[in-house]
Image (tube, rainbow, N blue to C red):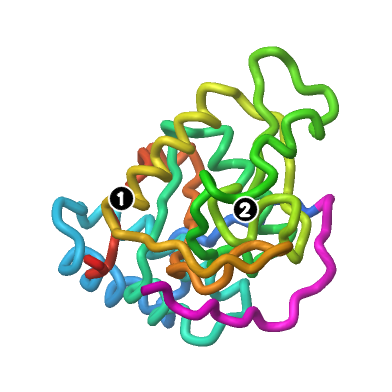
Amino acid sequence: TGTAPATAPPQPAPDPNAAPDPAPNPLPPAWPVAQLVARLVAQNANLTNSDANSIATQCLWLTSKSGFDNPFTKCNSLPIFVSGVDVASAAMHDIQALERYPAWVLVHREQSSIKPGSGWASNLCPGKTSSQNCDEYPMFGMEEGGPAATVYPDLLAIDAVENQRQGTRYSSFIAACSMKTGTSNPPGNSIGGDAFLGIPLPPSWGIPSITNLCNGKTS
């Protein structure tokens, strides 16, 4: 069954002009990066120490900025959807969107095939070219995405191939981690879908998307 959505701490009004604020690399020694790396590697087969270090750094950084309690616990207990260099423009947009509204780092699965409003943002990105899609974050297949979201999603015209590839990676993540949708709640989005962290990595780090970082979740 789905888990109850976490309640976000009070957030500032979304800032449409926020610039990415990269994580210090490495984070200060007091941050539990090494401990989180050990947990991630132990819980997720085939995850290298090097990739785990980058994911741990970014996860602790983004989750701490959201204001949620205990970023370490969030990062080692919730599934993590990692977007990387193979979806570079989408990952960069997600990073930008998280600057606008940090609480979006914790999102919830919603079944997009039964959600009203599919394609709602297609023509809402000024200057979009024929080789681009209007990307949205949070994604449509998340309770925090779509036209009925409590906070209006961040929209940006990005490379169409990378946008669609990220959607495919997200579908793989949903299947690998058995992410369940919540209960229908018309006219709003569903509620109670499985919670997870959306952690985009800067493309310059050279790490591709990871779709099976389930942190022990199997059902």
The vertical placement of 199 against 165, above or below, is below
- In this rendering, the count of numbered labels is 2
Is residue 62 visible in this depiction of the protein?
no
Query: Does the magenta stretch mainly form a helix, a strand or a loop?
Result: loop
- Quick one: label 2 or label 1, which is nearer the N terminus? 2
Helix, strand or loop at label 2? It is loop
Q: Is residue 64 left or right of residue 77?
A: right
Q: Residue at x 27, y 52 (%)?
A: 176
Magenta part of the protein: which range? 1-17
The residue shown at (41%, 77%) is: 29
Residue 1 shown left or right of residue 41 in the figure: right
Mark 2 burial class by Cα count in 10 Å: few <14, some 14-19, many 20+: many
Q: Quadrant of the N terminus?
A: bottom left
Q: Which residue is mark 2?
A: 138
Q: Is residue 5 covered in magenta? A: yes
**Residue closest to the eye, 111 or 174:** 111
Q: Position of residue 83 (x, y in %)?
A: 45, 45
Q: Residue at x 69, y 44 (%)?
A: 117
Q: Left of 177 or right of it: where is 120?
A: right
Closest to the observer, 129 or 73: 129
**Numbered label attached to residue 9:** none
Residue 100 locus on image (x, y percent): 74, 58
Placement of 164 over or under 211, stated as above or below:
above
Q: Which mark is residue 175?
A: 1
Q: Amino acid at mark 2?
A: Pro
Which part of the image, by quadrant, shows the C terminus? bottom left
In the image, 3 versus 106, the foreground residue is 3
On the question of residue 188 being in view, the answer is yes
The quadrant in which residue 78 appears is bottom left
Name the kind of residue labelled 1 in the image.
Ala
Q: Secondary structure at mark 1?
A: helix
